[in-house]
Amino acid sequence: MERTRSRVFPATSVPDEYLALSDEEARRRILAVKRELGRDLVILGHHYQRPEIVALSDYRGDSFGLSKLAANAEARYIVFCGVHFMAESASILCREDQVVVHPNLEAGCPLADSAPADLVEPAWEVLNRVLGEGRLMPVTYMNSYAELKAFVGRNGGAVCTSSNAHRAFQWALEQRERLFFFPDQYLGRNALKRLGRSGLRAVVWNSELFDGGLSREEIESADVFLWDGYCHVHRWFLPEHVDRVRELDPQAIVIVHPECREEVVAKADHAGSTEFMARFVASAPDGAHIAIGTEINMVRRLAMEFPTKRIYPLARSMCPNMFKITLQSLAWTLENLGQVNVVRVEEPVRSQARLALDRMLQLEG
Ligand code: SF4
């Protein structure tokens, strides 16, 4: 069943005069602002953005990599071409005097939407009532909103990425008896597997059922609680897709994102973050065949960038939210910098979320 909960952002329709711009004209105007502002402006482009947006970005990367770039940027204006929670993370990490802007505030993320803090808090209370205070450690994936990161921060927990989730789990279970992970149940399962602690008992907290759909006995006997969210883009990939590739292209190497189902990750040759995938493709020898289970825009771009390798999608899966940023919305945002689509995480959410992000950075060493 697809989720219906969805975070509501302020309406920010691109004005008609910008919608009417041809791609060429919008590109010309974007480049003019870039030239005029020089080092005062940095445009960050997530790997899943449209190719024309990535081409105009100063840096490309995954959400955490780009947020770290934002934190170290000199620029006064940081334009984050990704989905909304990414711009929030940049706002949490950057300096007070920097302005973070997102070219289309309607580009949300259903995975982040699935775990709003006001739904997580009652679940946390139920588990603490049954298990006793101080036994449970919260960990949230980077793909969550600032309020949830703040909740995790003030309850002693940490943020994690798809690359370091297993390390964050290890840390959490060293600090406290049990772990509550939000919002991606598949990343949770894959991280537990990578951690190699097969004795841990994990249960899914069904956020649409009373008490998570768990009995008192099930709660008491669980070590790990996984929020029931998922990324529909990565859940789309099935074990049959891997089987088909193996059948049609036996020399193909299959790489997938750890937000994919556990059975898909088990059948793939490698699983890793978008940064991992980009590096894997870049370092593969000419002639390599690589089938990739992640968002289609990234796969297509890698295929174009490395024409001497055979790069293709495991199946076609697109993130419609990432697709919402267009040349026209970017031109509008840049010509009205600081006036429209500013993303600013206010106190105390900012400091509390920062705590959870800093704990992750400490884990990174
Ligand atoms: S790819 Fe998945 S996790 Fe990433 S923004 Fe789209 S829906 Fe959210």
Image (cartoon, helix red, strand yellow):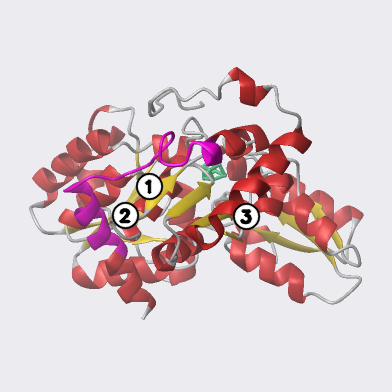
Badge 1: residue crowd in 10 Å (few <14, some 14–19, many ≥20): many
Amino acid type at mark 2: Ile
Is residue 140 magenta-colored? no
Q: Residue at x 16, y 48 (%)?
A: 348
Looking at the picture, how far across and down is residue 352, in whole percent?
20, 54
Inspect the image, locate mark 3, and give the three-letter code of the amino acid beneath it. Arg
Q: Specify few, some or many for label 3: CA neighbours under 10 Å numbering under 14, 14-19, or 20 or more.
A: few
Q: Nearer the viewer, residue 114 or 196?
A: 114
Local SS, label 2 = helix
Ligand 1 found in image quarter: top right
| Residue positioned 15% across, 39% down in the render | 126
Q: SS of the residue at dot 3?
A: helix
The mark closer to the camera, 2 or 3, is 3
Can you name the residue that lies furthest to the top here? 16
Q: Give the residues in magenta.
A: 333-357
Does residue 355 appear to the left or right of 341 in the view shown?
Answer: left
Task: Please name the residue that numbered disc 3 is placed on.
Answer: 35
**Drawn side of residue 327 relative to residue 103, left or right:** right
Q: Is mark 2 within 8 Å of ligand 1?
A: no
Drawn side of residue 243 relative to residue 338, left or right:
right
- Tags 1 and 2 touching, CB below 8 Å: yes
Report the residue marked by disc 2: 92
Residues at marks 2 and 3, CA–CA distance in whole angstroms: 27 Å
Q: Residue furthest bottom?
A: 365
- Distance in Å between CA atoms under marks 1 and 3: 26 Å
Measured Cα–Cα span from mark 1 to mark 2? 6 Å
Q: x%, y% of residue 237?
A: 67, 44
